[in-house]
Image (cartoon, rainbow, N blue to C red):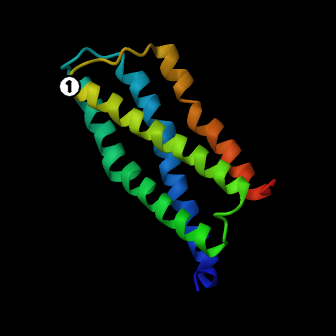
Amino acid sequence: MLSEYYHILLALHLLAVIAWMAGLLYLPRLFIYHLEFEVGSKAYTTFCTMERRLLKIIMRPAILLTFLFGILLAFSANAWASPWFHMKLLLVLLLAAFHGFLARVAKQYVRREKPSLSRKTLVFLNEIPFLLAIFIVFLAVLKPY
């Protein structure tokens, strides 16, 4: 029955992934800029607000919809038994863990604790979601094994 809706589920899944990835790529960049401001300054508080809104209004619904439509897609395509799907799922779970890590960093800023991460580390972390996305997309498209 779900297979009848495969293309609709796929479209909804892709839209949710795009929104989630936008947040995963933008939030670390906000953290990099946030480092430049003194704790308690107007700009510091503005960045806390931006980060909180990004997490709660865009990223949280996007991750939930990504997983919901992804699970429905997996059922509609009988992907659960495929090794490529297991690898893709593992990489998506790593993205979800990265999302959780970013949420913890945002909470540090709100508590007026600058994270112990250097600007260089944050720049590196900014690349992680896209690198994982490359492998996820190739696994989903090529279904190599």
Q: Nearer the viewer, residue 77 or 7?
A: 77
Quadrant the C terminus occupies? bottom right
Few, some or many residues within 10 Å of mark 1 (<14, 14–19, 20+): few
- Identified at 79% across, 56% down, the residue is 142
Up/down of 8 relative to 45, above or below: below
Residue 27 x/y as whole percent: 43, 35
Quadrant the N terminus occupies? bottom right
Task: Answer with left or right where residue 2 lies relative to residue 63.
Answer: right
Residue, far front: 81
Q: Nearer the viewer, residue 99 or 51?
A: 99
- Identified at 50% across, 45% down, the residue is 22
Residue 26 x/y as whole percent: 47, 37
Residue 64 x/y as whole percent: 42, 58
Residue 99 x/y as whole percent: 44, 40
Up/down of 100 relative to 141, above or below: above
Up/down of 86 relative to 55, above or below: below
Q: Nearer the viewer, residue 84 or 50?
A: 84
Up/down of 86 relative to 129, above or below: below
Element class at badge 1: loop
Q: How many marks?
A: 1
* Residue 100 image-quadrant placement: top left
User: In the rendered image, which residue does mark 1 sit on?
Assistant: 111
- Identified at 81% across, 53% down, the residue is 144
Which kind of residue does numbered mark 1 sit on?
Arg
